[in-house]
Amino acid sequence: MIQRIQSIWLLLAAIASLLTFKFSFYFGQRVGGLINEDLTAASGLLLIVLAAATGIGSFIAIFLYKDRKTQLRIAVIALLLSVLSLIVYFTQIKNFTSGQLSFTAIIAFLVPIFLVLAAKGIWKDQRLIKSLDRLR
């Protein structure tokens, strides 16, 4: 299970997705606000749902190593959710009058990269198994 490289990518995606709750994506002053605020995954209900679903989906996909089709589907769904969360982050930035991307925003950008690498590994495993079945 964990010996497969895609399991490591899925674990890293789950960890990075859950780290977005703690680390900020954007730091600045909101419209009408006087103090600087952080934009994290915990800043809004939609971001909470997207980040949690991505993290939990990635973690669940690790244990579906015997059913590669389902594992691939869940990884692709988590990938779509992580891209959607990035879109929501950038739409939330419009609520700030001034500010800048945090250095820790790289964590949010790593999640879809890890999920693409995991999906690629799952796809390669699936092709390998199909080619071995043809030889039997």
Image (spheres, rainbow, N blue to C red):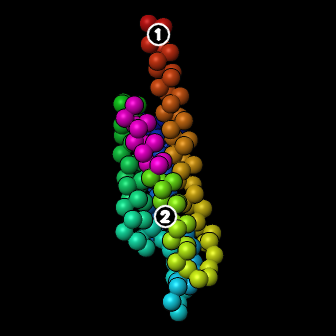
Q: Is residue 134 above or below residue 56?
A: above
Q: Nearer the viewer, residue 131 or 2?
A: 131
In the rendered structure, which segment of residues is drawn in magenta? 69-80
Q: Residue at x 59, y 83 (%)?
A: 97
Q: Position of residue 91 (x, y in %)?
A: 52, 68
Question: Hey, what amino acid is under mark 2?
Answer: Val
User: Which residue in the rendered view is the most extreme toward the bottom?
Assistant: 34
User: Which residue in the rendered view is the most extreme toward the top?
Assistant: 136
Q: Which mark identifies residue 134?
A: 1
> Label 1: few (<14), some or many (≥20) within 10 Å?
few
Q: Is residue 11 in sight in this rendering?
A: no
Q: Position of residue 19 (x, y in %)?
A: 47, 63
Q: Residue at x 53, y 34 (%)?
A: 121
Return the residue at label 2: 88
Q: Quadrant of the N terminus?
A: top left
Q: Nearer the viewer, residue 7 or 40?
A: 40
> Label 2: few (<14), some or many (≥20) within 10 Å?
some
Question: Hey, what amino acid is under mark 1?
Answer: Arg
Q: Secondary structure at mark 1?
A: helix
Between discs 2 and 1, the one toward the N terminus: 2
